[in-house]
Amino acid sequence: MTESQPRMTAPIRAERRQPTEPPHHVPATPGGLIRSTLGAAVSAGALLVLFWLPAEYGLDPTGMGRLTGLTEMGEIKQQLAAEAEADAIAETAAPTPAVAMPEVTDRLDRIEAQLAAIAAVIGADGLAAAPVEQPAPATPEPAPQGWRDEASYTLQPGQGIEVKLAMTEGQTARFEWTANGAVVNFDLHGDGSGQKISYEQGRAVPDQTGELVAAFTGNHGWFWRNRSDAPVTVTLRVAGEYAELKAP
């Protein structure tokens, strides 16, 4: 047998590659910077006109916003902003509720009482027959038949008094009261059964006649206060459905 000769292989040679050239850069010259800046400004301007103005303010100079629906969105935003601004102006312009001070209220009550007293002595010809002295309270007339209770109370300037009837819900009482030529402030109210109610109030009133219907079971009646500068006598007459007359 013939022995096989070993195969000779050529040695592998490493090929030398040429180094890769660095990427080509645009030289940063003043002209290149200006062109880049102008290009960016043009792009920003296009975005502003085509998209931002229609979407935010409803302004559509090119008509593109109307096609894309951005103009409608901007108009809605502007309408909402205008309504919010109008509400803020209305709240700012709304008057702040005045807080009544006791001393101011008392002074107003005295002025009203004086005006009412002056009006009571004005004649038909418009001339005031001013008395030299404060007239004394008139003597209450005897209660006519049909009245169940009658009571008189003299109030000094600034003094108040409360008189009530004990009544059951739905009961009706007839009444009349008079300040005997003067005027008083009054509050017709009731309380009881865990409830409160104010039927009627008045300032500088000389007298009143009517019916009191109890809204609920409890005490119902009057509070009078003399806001004038002289004593006032209040006379009350009542009749009808009530258990008793309660007074100080």
Image: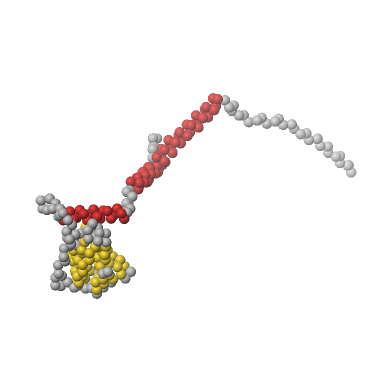
Q: Nearer the viewer, residue 238 or 109?
A: 109
Residue visible at 20% across and 72% down?
149
Q: How many marks?
A: 0
Asked if residue 217 can be seen in this view, the reply is yes
Please say whether residue 203 is visible from this viewpoint. Answer: no
Task: Pick whichever, 9 or 60, lies toward us.
Answer: 60
Where in the figure is residue 67, as x and y percent of width and height? Answer: 40, 40
Looking at the image, which residue sits at the far bottom?
243
Q: Relative to residue 225, is residue 83 depicted above or below?
A: above
Q: Residue at x 15, y 70 (%)?
A: 143
The quadrant of the image that shows the C terminus is: bottom left
Position in image of residue 204 (x %, y %): 21, 58
Residue at 24% over, 63% down = 155
Compared across the picture, whether 19 is left or right of 194 comes to right
In the displayed structure, 89 sits above or below 122; it is above
Give the residue at x 86% y 39%.
5
x and y percent of residue 6 in the render? 85, 39
Which residue occupies the foreground of this view, 43 or 167?
167
Q: Quadrant of residue 147?
A: bottom left
Q: Is residue 232 above or below residue 98?
A: below
- Find the residue positioned furthest to the left: 125
Displayed quadrant of residue 46: top left
Quarter of the picture holding the N terminus? top right
In percent of width and height, residue 97 lies at 32, 52
Q: Is residue 177 left or right of residue 218?
A: left
